[in-house]
């Protein structure tokens, strides 16, 4: 599938109708989602015919992208039942098969590296300090091949140090820097839209 076709399909997906600020729910736009998954497959071969987990999947944009790129199995995890309802509708609309699980990914009790690849757009940790690191720690425990994750560029050194020192990463690499258009979703947002610099990371876990 070509990048433009993937972005077009993701652009038709439903997003959060009532986003929850405490969960830092922001939609992963089709521009970023398509490039994230397209790069994971075309540069590294980490999606097609792989078992892919989407941590904090929200409305399922990254899950859908993985399914469209022919992952053998896609599982989306999220704590919010309303988001998972939307994600299920999105999967049905695209006619792709995705399993959705309601749970707190930071408390997952999976034994060992049970998936090939984890993709995620975790909370940035602005509402709950350290939430981004909790997601990364959980992802690194279950992925055997790679973890792809978005983090604010301003946290780059901190992310790299923690991944290599604390989270069993063999390598931690910023693949590209992207602009994340944060729409005005909450009352405390003063501006209509905020443009945030984010890094797309690829982490390679050590084999257990």
Image: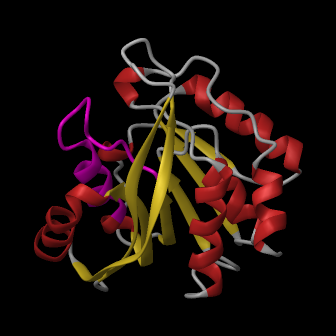
Q: Nearer the viewer, residue 189 or 133?
A: 189
- Relative image position of residue 122 (x, y in whole percent): 39, 48
Q: Is residue 111 visible?
A: no
Query: Residue 195, image x and y in percent?
Result: 44, 44
Residue shown at 63% from the left, 80% from the top: 41
Scheme of colours in the image: secondary structure
Residue found 62% across the figure and 44% down from its top? 100
Q: Residue 23: where, in percent of width, then height?
A: 39, 29
Identify the residue at horizontal 47%, vertical 44% (top origin): 56
Q: Say above or below: 117 vs 204.
A: above
Left or right: where 19 falls relative to 41: left
The magenta segment: 121-139
Q: Quadrant of the N terminus?
A: bottom right
Say left or right for 75 vs 152. right
Which quarter of the figure has residue 128? top left
Which quadrant holds the C terminus? Answer: bottom left
Residue 201: name its quadrant.
bottom left
| Residue 166 located left or right of residue 26 | left
Say if the magenta span includes residue 130: yes
Q: Which percent across, then down, holds residue 120?
A: 47, 56
Q: Is residue 11 magenta?
A: no
Residue 199, compared with residue 84, is above or below; it is: below
Does residue 93 appear in this view?
A: yes
């Amino acid at each position: 599938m070509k990048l433009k076709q993937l972005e077009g399909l993701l652009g038709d997906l439903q997003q959060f109708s009532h986003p929850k600020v405490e969960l830092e729910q922001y939609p992963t736009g089709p521009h970023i989602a398509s490039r994230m998954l397209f790069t994971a497959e075309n540069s590294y071969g980490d999606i097609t015919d792989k078992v892919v987990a989407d941590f904090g999947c929200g409305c399922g944009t990254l899950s859908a992208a993985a399914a469209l790129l022919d992952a053998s199995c896609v599982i989306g995890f999220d704590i919010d039942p309303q988001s998972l309802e939307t994600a299920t509708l999105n999967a049905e609309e695209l006619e792709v098969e995705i399993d959705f699980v309601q749970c707190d990914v930071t408390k997952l009790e999976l034994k060992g590296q049970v998936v090939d690849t984890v993709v995620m757009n975790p909370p940035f940790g602005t509402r709950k300090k350290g939430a981004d690191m909790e997601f990364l720690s959980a992802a690194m425990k279950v992925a055997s091949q790679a973890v792809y994750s978005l983090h604010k560029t301003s946290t780059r050194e901190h992310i790299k140090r923690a991944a290599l020192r604390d989270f069993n990463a063999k390598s931690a690499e910023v693949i590209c820097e992207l602009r994340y258009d944060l729409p005005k979703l909450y009352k405390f947002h003063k501006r209509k839209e905020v443009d945030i610099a984010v890094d797309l990371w690829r982490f390679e876990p050590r084999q257990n």
